[in-house]
Image (cartoon, rainbow, N blue to C red):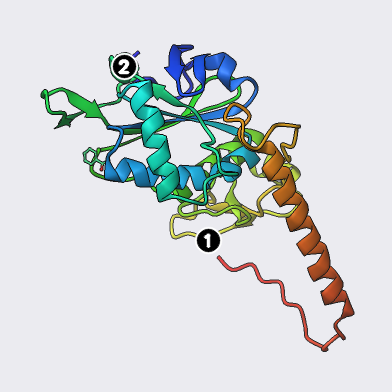
């Protein structure tokens, strides 16, 4: 298993977790998945990371991504540590810890999935797990892997941004540029002929003039793509990861949007001119 490549089928491993025994593919079902590893329970950086992941559980759920963490300690340690994480981060996800943590006490998965950081050792001189992130698609294939050393905590906003790009580009034949954020313009793939691009992107394709004369830097508005994932899952069940809460949040957001629209409609026209610009 070491050196899992992008596009490869992710191993269908069995594991003990804080919510029971799982077989990974069954755990994922039809969802996307994110598996992230941690060096050790009861460590400061890991606690901030899991606390942040807990706060973002609705964001992952909204994207139909099931979360699962891994650390090389026992289930008993995990359960104790979860209490600390929830105390550190009181926002949580409906009060409960929203995803399972795998107990990889014998480092079998950590070794098999290439997660060890040889630079960081425990009190017995054994290497700890690095901060590994795997994003797995609904086809159970690896879509992204990131590997951070134990001494650098991850940026979970970036992980969500990457998932947005992965899901967009799985749905539409586009690529996302540096620092792209959802809603911003995207790139037309360099291999797509101009006629095909014109047909594929009716919202328009803008080509930047370049000294080389080559017409490869082509932008188009981001295609619409997000479906909402709102089946009837419970907010506090870590195996269904907060769908009820997502529904409620989406309902509130919709209400707020409608209220804003109503307020806008009620305002008198101020004679302003709407300018739509396409800068490069
Ligand atoms: C931490 O999570 O704080 C940590 C773990 C291992 C090495 C360094 C930091």
Which quadrant is the N terminus positioned in? top left
How would you rate the neighbour count of disc 1 (Cα within 10 Å): few for under 14, some for 14-19, many for 20 or more? few
Question: Which secondary structure lies at badge 1?
Answer: loop
What residue does disc 1 label? 209
Q: Position of residue 262 (x, y in %)?
A: 86, 71
Question: Residue at point 78% right, 56% down?
Answer: 254
Instruction: Decide which of tag 2 and tag 1 comes sooner along the chain.
Output: 2
Compared to residue 71, the image places residue 165 above or below, namely: below
Is 164 or 217 nearer to us in this picture? 164
**Would you say 263 lies left or right of 86 here?**
right
Is 9 or 122 nearer to us in this picture? 122
Question: Which secondary structure lies at badge 2?
Answer: loop
Q: Position of residue 265 (x, y in %)?
A: 87, 75
Question: Residue at point 58% right, 52% down?
Answer: 218
Q: Quadrant of residue 75?
A: top left
Which quadrant is the C terminus positioned in? bottom right
Q: Are marks 2 and 1 in contact (CB under 8 Å)?
A: no
Ligand 1 resides in the quarter of the picture at top left
What residue does disc 2 label? 2
Disc number lying in front (2 or 1): 2
Label 2 and label 1: CA atoms lie apart by 44 Å
Q: Answer yes or no: is residue 280 visible.
A: yes
Compared to residue 1, the image places residue 85 above or below, namely: below
Q: Position of residue 278 (x, y in %)?
A: 64, 67
Compared to residue 51, the image places residue 191 above or below, namely: above
Question: Residue at point 51% right, 14% down?
Answer: 22
Q: Answer yes or no: is residue 195 visible.
A: no
Q: Position of residue 227 (x, y in %)?
A: 73, 40
Compared to residue 32, the image places residue 151 above or below, namely: below
Is 15 or 158 nearer to us in this picture? 15
């Amino acid at each position: 298993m070491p050196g899992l490549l992008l596009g490869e089928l992710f191993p269908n491993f069995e594991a003990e977790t804080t919510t029971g025994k799982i077989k990974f593919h069954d755990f994922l079902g039809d969802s996307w998945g994110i598996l992230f590893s941690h060096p050790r329970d009861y460590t400061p950086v890991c606690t901030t990371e899991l606390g942040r992941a807990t706060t973002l559980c609705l964001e992952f759920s909204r994207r139909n991504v099931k979360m699962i963490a891994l650390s090389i300690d026992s289930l008993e340690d995990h359960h104790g540590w979860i209490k600390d994480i929830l105390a550190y981060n009181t926002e949580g996800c409906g009060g409960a810890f929203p995803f399972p943590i795998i107990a990889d006490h014998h480092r079998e998965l950590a070794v098999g999935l290439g997660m060890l950081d040889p630079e960081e050792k425990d009190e017995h001189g054994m290497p700890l797990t690095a901060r590994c992130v795997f994003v797995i698609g609904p086809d159970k294939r690896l879509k992204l892997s990131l590997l951070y050393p134990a001494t650098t905590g991850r940026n979970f906003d970036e992980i969500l941004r990457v998932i947005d790009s992965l899901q967009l580009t799985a749905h539409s034949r586009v690529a996302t540029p540096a620092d792209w954020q959802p809603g911003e313009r995207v790139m037309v793939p360099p291999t797509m002929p101009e006629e095909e691009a014109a047909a594929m992107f009716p919202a328009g394709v803008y080509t930047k003039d370049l000294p080389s004369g080559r017409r490869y830097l082509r932008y188009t508005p981001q295609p619409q793509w997000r479906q909402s994932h709102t089946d009837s899952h419970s907010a506090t069940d870590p195996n269904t990861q907060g769908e009820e809460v997502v529904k409620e949040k989406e309902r509130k957001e919709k209400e707020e949007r409608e209220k804003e629209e109503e307020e806008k409609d009620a305002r008198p026209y101020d004679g302003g001119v709407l300018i739509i610009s396409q800068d490069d």
